Amino acid sequence: MATPKPRVKVPRRAAAGEIITIKTLISHKMESGRRINKQGSLVPRQIINKFRCDFNGETVFSCDIEPAIASNPYFSFKARVDAGGVFTFTWSDDNGDVYSTQKTIELTS
Amino acid sequence: MKLSRRRALHLSAGAAVLAAIPASLLSAAAADATPADERLQQFTGGRTPLRDKITLTAPEIAENGNTVPVSIHVDSPMNRHSYVEAVTLLAPGNPNPGVITFHFTPNSGSADATTRIRLAKTQTLIAVARLNDGTVFMDEKNVKVTIGGCGG
């Protein structure tokens, strides 16, 4: 499997107290452990099992993920922005790998 | 004390909301509790969810069971005193009923989440919200699946 690539959409600016929408996507097959491959064998489970979004070090939103989440997991959620700073996004793979990306946001005025 | 019309309507709406919850989901103590019932009980701590506050959005017909868009929204102030702590999605018709549990904080601003899920077959999807004070709410949507996706 190619290295999972995360893609995140966060507004560049927000007013203090504004609730923004964040969209995230990561390329990942999300093998459920129930698929039979062309050779007739069961492909073992390998999924992203956790996702977390932190802002300036504090967790804003997270999920515990099971194999029923579709391939290339997509999550959209909200965050209230009271100050400028950095959003950190982290995806944890069953195999122990962790993928991460960051986005900066500024306050308008 | 005279029961105002508004108060009477409010009380009867509450009773109707409670009555709407499927009996099977409330009786997980019964010998034939399904895995979905058990998951529900674990999440709610045994409390009975009210059919209120949470809205589950899912298509009536899913063309492809491998990727079905679903959203949840919970009506909540999302401040330190009252916020949604978690929302879990259950797909009782999948080999494993658990789908995802979203964890929110007051910093979420609004208890909203959207994702895409796998549904093995036509079924009634369930979303349950738990607030920081332990109160639980639920909503459900029937989704017809034309081509099943492996739910795992």
Image (cartoon, rainbow, N blue to C red):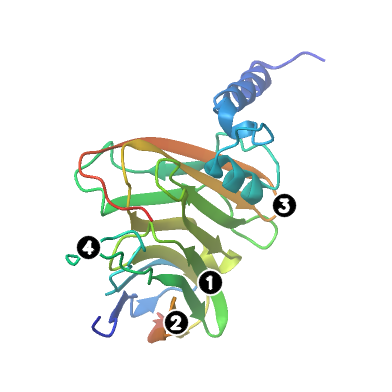
Q: Position of residue B139 (x, y in %)?
A: 49, 38
Where residue A88 appears, x then y in whole percent? 45, 83
For the residues beneath circles 2 and 1, the answer to whether they share a chain is yes
**Residue highlighted by disc 4:** A40
Q: Which residue is mark 3?
A: B133
Q: Secondary structure at mark 1?
A: strand
Q: Nearer the viewer, mark 3 or mark 4?
A: 4
Q: Is residue B10 above or below residue A6?
A: above
Q: Dot 1 surroundings within 10 Å: few (below 14), some, or many (20 or more)?
A: many
The residue pinned by badge 2 equals A87
Q: Please name which of the two marks, 4 or 1, marks the residue nearer to the observer.
A: 4
Q: Image quadrant for the C terminus of chain B?
A: bottom left
As drawn, is B120 to the left or to the right of B2?
left
Label 2 neighbour load within 10 Å: few <14, some 14-19, many 20+? many
Classify residue B116 as left or right of residue B101: left
Q: Image quarter for residue A28? A: bottom left
User: Residue A18, can we see it?
Assistant: no
Of the 4 image quadrants, the one containing the N terminus of chain B is top right
Q: Amino acid at mark 1?
A: Val
Does the residue at mark 3 contact the one at mark 4 (Cβ under 8 Å)? no
SS for dot 2: strand
Callouts 4 and 1 close, C-beta under 8 Å: no
Alpha carbon distance from label 3 to label 1: 19 Å
